[in-house]
Image: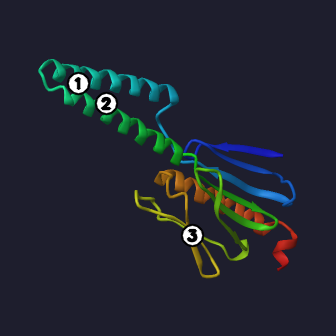
């Protein structure tokens, strides 16, 4: 059994091992959007923002412009809400799994519900990405007239690394004897 951890967007895992129910797994990656602010960093940022906004509001209150302190409080609530929405959106992820049964791509929403699942026959799969990758380069998987963009939240280098890892796994899939290859 071979297990690799790849650091694409923080939390991506690849596994080459027998899977549960799907036969041999050639590639299994979970792609999460990267968030650079840790929970401790978030608390520190919120504390510094609250202290700064309170100081500004207090200064204006002492000058007689007391309504400003309310706006400072509203600004803090909006800032906190924006960060919470951003963290909620970061719970979304994509999963790519290449097994004997084929390639399955799942998009999971932040609430944990699967929004889309694509199943592709790997014999006809094309993996396209600009080389060298640029900021707006997309990783496109296409098969039988269907095209999908994968890993749009990854950096260009991470998309290239994912494309190369998927091509390598696809080559191993095509070289291996398995029931799906005959169809």
Q: Is residue 134 left or right of residue 105?
A: left
What residue is at 15 percent from the left and 17 percent from the top?
62
100 relative to 95, above or below: below
Q: Nearer the viewer, mark 3 or mark 2?
A: 2
Of labels 1 and 2, earlier in sequence is 1
Q: Is residue 48 left or right of residue 38?
A: left
Observer-nearest of 35 and 24: 35
Looking at this view, is 20 or 172 the one in front? 20
Q: Which residue is mark 3?
A: 148
According to the picture, the residue beneath numbered tag 1 turns out to be: 57
Q: Are marks 1 and 2 in contact (CB under 8 Å)?
A: yes
Assign a secondary structure to mark 1: helix
Residue position marked by numbered label 2 in the rendering: 73
Q: CA distance from mark 3 to mark 2?
A: 44 Å
Residue 28 in the image, given as x and y percentages of width and height: 72, 54
Crowding near pointer 3: few (<14 within 10 Å), some, many (20+)? Answer: few
Place of residue 177 in the rendered image (x, y in percent of width and height, measured from the top left):
86, 68
Dot 2 falls on a residue whose secondary structure is: helix
Whether pointer 3 and pointer 2 mark residues with C-beta atoms closer than 8 Å, the reply is: no
Say if 115 sits above or below 120 in the image.
above
Q: Quadrant of residue 97?
A: bottom right
The residues tagged by marks 3 and 1 sit, at their Cα atoms, a distance apart of 50 Å
């Amino acid at each position: 059994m071979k297990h690799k951890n790849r650091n694409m967007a923080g939390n991506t895992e690849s596994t080459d091992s027998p899977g549960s129910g799907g036969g041999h797994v050639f590639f299994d990656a979970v792609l999460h959007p990267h968030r650079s602010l840790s929970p401790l960093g978030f608390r520190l940022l919120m504390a510094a923002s609250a202290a700064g906004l309170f100081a500004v509001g207090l200064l204006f209150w002492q000058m007689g412009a007391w309504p400003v302190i309310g706006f400072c409080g509203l600004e803090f609530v909006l800032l906190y809400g924006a960060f919470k929405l951003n963290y909620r959106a970061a719970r979304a992820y994509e999963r790519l799994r290449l097994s004997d049964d084929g390639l399955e791509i799942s998009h999971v929403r932040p609430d944990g519900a699967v929004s889309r699942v694509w199943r592709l026959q790997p014999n006809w799969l094309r993996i396209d990405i600009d080389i060298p990758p640029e900021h707006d380069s997309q990783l496109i998987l296409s098969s039988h007239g269907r095209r999908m963009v994968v890993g749009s939240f990854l950096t260009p280098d991470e998309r290239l690394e994912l494309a190369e890892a998927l091509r390598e796994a696809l080559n191993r899939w095509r070289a291996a004897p398995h029931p799906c290859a005959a169809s």
